């Protein structure tokens, strides 16, 4: 056997087989997927609410009579704009550190903090995705809802939101992929995710090549898999339009 193959074999055994170090990667993968899954749910929930407020303001503010309703809508829109500006204008790793060391300073549950932080961060981007989807719906759809006797909330719920959701679903899936990669910084708050698992192996073996390449390959396989799913979803949505 060539010498370089023997070297790779020895490195593989050292980094993954000895002391069952492969479990660091397996357990870290589970944590990464857990953070991503729940953060996406939180992000979608926040994003839908913010998108509805922002799109409602853009569509109806000129027709709303001066009074409490107009003031309330303006205040909500201002809060949403500040939220979007702050979250989208600061690095997610800084948000993670602020959440862990300042907001949830008494909590030692890094996974919970990571889920909340990435969920809030994702919500800002999901909000703009959803808002663009809502604004792309023809105004005639709103008028059709009113002609059926729906009020504004019912029109949004039964007519506008379902159509907007279908239009932005591929973009939401891509946001899921981006979020999956962003969670690699969760190790900053003592979360043993996939990237942290590779770093732990590196710290035990002092051999950076194998664990870092393994982490990169796992992320690459995950991204390729979810990209394939997004492509399949887009093709199905296009075929359903005909």
Image (spheres, rainbow, N blue to C red):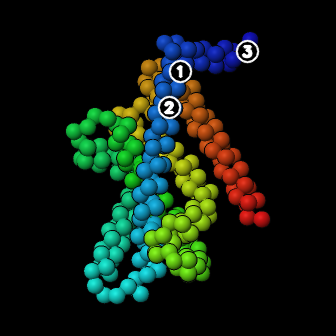
Q: Residue at (41%, 57%) from the top-left corner?
A: 46
Tell me the mark number nearer the camera, choosing from 1 and 2: 2
Q: Which residue is mark 3?
A: 2
Q: Quadrant of the C terminus?
A: bottom right
> Which residue corresponds to mark 2?
30
Residue name at image x 25 percent, y 48 percent: 103
CA–CA distance between discs 2 and 3? 36 Å
Depicted 16 relative to depicted 116: above or below: above
Q: Which mark is residue 220?
A: none
Q: Nearer the viewer, residue 212 or 136?
A: 136
**Residue at mark 1:** 22
Q: Is residue 54 left or right of residue 209?
A: left
Closer to the camera in the image, 142 or 31: 142
Against 76, residue 201 (above or below) is above
The kind of secondary structure element at disc 1 is helix
Q: Residue furthest left?
A: 106
In-front residue for pair 90/55: 55
The N terminus sits in image quarter: top right
């Amino acid at each position: 056997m060539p010498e370089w193959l023997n070297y790779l074999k020895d490195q593989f055994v050292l980094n993954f087989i000895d002391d069952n170090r492969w479990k660091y990667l397996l357990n870290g993968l589970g944590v990464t997927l857990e953070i991503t899954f729940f953060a996406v749910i939180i992000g979608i929930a926040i994003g839908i609410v913010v998108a509805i407020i922002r799109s409602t303001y853009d569509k109806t503010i000129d027709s709303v009579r001066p009074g409490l309703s107009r003031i309330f809508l303006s205040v909500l829109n201002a809060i949403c704009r500040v939220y979007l500006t702050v979250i989208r204008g600061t690095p997610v790793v800084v948000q993670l550190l602020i959440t862990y060391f300042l907001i949830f300073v008494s909590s030692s549950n890094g996974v919970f903090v990571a889920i909340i932080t990435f969920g809030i961060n994702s919500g800002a981007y999901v909000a703009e995705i959803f808002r663009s989807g809502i604004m792309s719906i023809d105004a005639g759809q709103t008028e059709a809802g009113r002609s059926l006797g729906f009020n504004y909330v019912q029109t949004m719920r039964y007519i506008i939101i379902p159509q907007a959701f279908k239009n932005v679903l591929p973009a939401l899936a891509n946001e899921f992929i981006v979020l999956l990669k962003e969670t690699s910084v969760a190790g900053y708050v003592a979360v043993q995710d996939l990237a942290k698992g590779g770093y732990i192996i590196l710290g035990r073996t002092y051999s950076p090549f194998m664990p870092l390449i393994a982490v990169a390959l796992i992320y690459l396989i995950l991204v390729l898999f979810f990209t394939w799913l997004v492509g399949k979803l887009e093709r199905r949505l296009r075929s359903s339009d005909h």
